[in-house]
Image: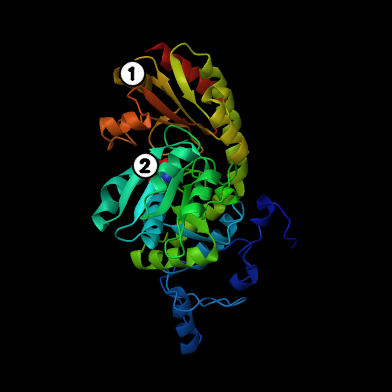
Amino acid sequence: MSSTVKPQTAIFSKGYDPQRSEGAAVPPVFRTSTFLFKSAEEGKRAFEIAYGLSPMKAGESPALIYTRVNNPNTEILEEKAACWDGAEDAALFGSGMGAISSTCLAFLRPGDTLVFGDPVYGGTEYFFRHMLPLFGIKTKHFSAGATREEMEALVKDDPTVRAIYLESPANPTILISDIAAARAIADQYSTPERPILLMVDNTFMGPIFAQPLKQGAHLVIYSATKFFGGHSDLVAGFTMGSKALMGQVKVFRTILGSIADPDTAWLIHRSLATLQVRMEKQQESARKLVAHLLDHPKVYDLSYPGLPQMGERQLALWREQCTGTGSLATFKVRGGEAEAFHFLNAIRHMKLAVSLGGVESLIQHPSSMTHSDMSPAEKAHAGITDNMIRISVGLEDVDDLITDLDQALAQI
Ligand SMILES: Cc1ncc(COP(=O)(O)O)c(C=O)c1O
């Protein structure tokens, strides 16, 4: 097959050889915990590779070992899912947090510092602020969407910086961060003993509307619970990057036990075929809904990628880094928490729930839900207010969603 086909074509054949599964048109679920070796030598070699004791040779295809290490469903999915980002390798995890925590622990050591763009998803925020310090790893942050100078100020005089972590667009403020500038900073201040890694959580846009590896990220991370899964019926995550870096990530995944099970891998595999059409259709509806909300007297500070109202810098970053606007938006309603709750309780069609990227529209209140663990000062720094609402637009009829939002806003 030509290697020039688009990801949407490649995913249908990449990574799966039907002849190894009785000709099954789609991969069966390999619901097994362990795999038989043909010989002791084959088993020895498989372990050498899995534990990073010896690199895999070109063309070598090591035997499967044990489902906490690898499994056909996981491997087939990883190869296909990496197509959009053009990643050399991918690792599937049991959740987005599994991907984030295992990836950070694979590279950060006591005494190191992680610099991140604030805000990030509440769970990630908790891991950075409360858990990494337990292991002697410090964190500090700049504001999402910061300039190169603002990011550099935290890195230039600090030889302990080992990683820069961006969530772009950020949850829940939908601010885009400058990936190329972060990579330039990482390169400038890296030393051979302490290379600085750039990790980017691309959950909101990716992999269809943004591919951060192309702007210089070393590793791209996903909550696959969101668009990859797409149906709010599973929890999973991905990290993707070069084979060399992913080798280290996979050793940590094996020992921390954070891989996803074969059934989850199979379900995401099924979702993969519709990922692009879902994201495109959800985006189309989101654009219509956002255009409507922009004119609504009870709504202000609407945040949505590509909107001129986001300001020139955000618009420039969006043009450089994204090929779409996505289906996540945040806005504020006139009033405070009481008015926001009144509005949320009046909504009929969007489901009042955290998470995003599924076929059904979800609506939530970041301050008291996804980001409730942050202190008032941290929320204020991140721009998360009590009247802020986050929506994830799904596949319902968009005019029905608009009518519903209007009637709920009218009740404030
Ligand atoms: C941007 C982002 N990254 C990571 C996560 C964590 O993913 P998971 O819930 O799959 O562990 C989330 C969850 O909402 C998220 O929004």
At 30% across and 21% down in the image, what residue appears? Answer: 337
Which residue was labeled with disc 2? 141
Q: Nearer the viewer, mark 1 or mark 2?
A: 2
Residue 301 to residue 353: above or below: above
Question: Mark 1 packing: few (<14 Cα in 10 Å), some, or many (20+)?
Answer: some
In the image, taking residue 280 as reference, residue 240 lies left or right, namely left
Query: What is the residue that sits farthest to the right in this orientation?
Result: 2
Residue 260 vs residue 326, the one in the foreground: 326
Mark 2 residue type: His
Query: Can you tell which mark lies on residue 342?
Result: 1
Question: Where is the C terminus found, in terms of image quarters?
Answer: top left
Q: Position of residue 30 (x, y in %)?
A: 49, 67
Q: Position of residue 210 (x, y in %)?
A: 58, 43
Check disc 2 and report its element: helix, strand or loop: strand
Q: Position of residue 58 (x, y in %)?
A: 61, 76
At 49% across and 44% down in the image, what residue appears? Answer: 203
At 29% across and 18% down in the image, what residue appears? Answer: 338
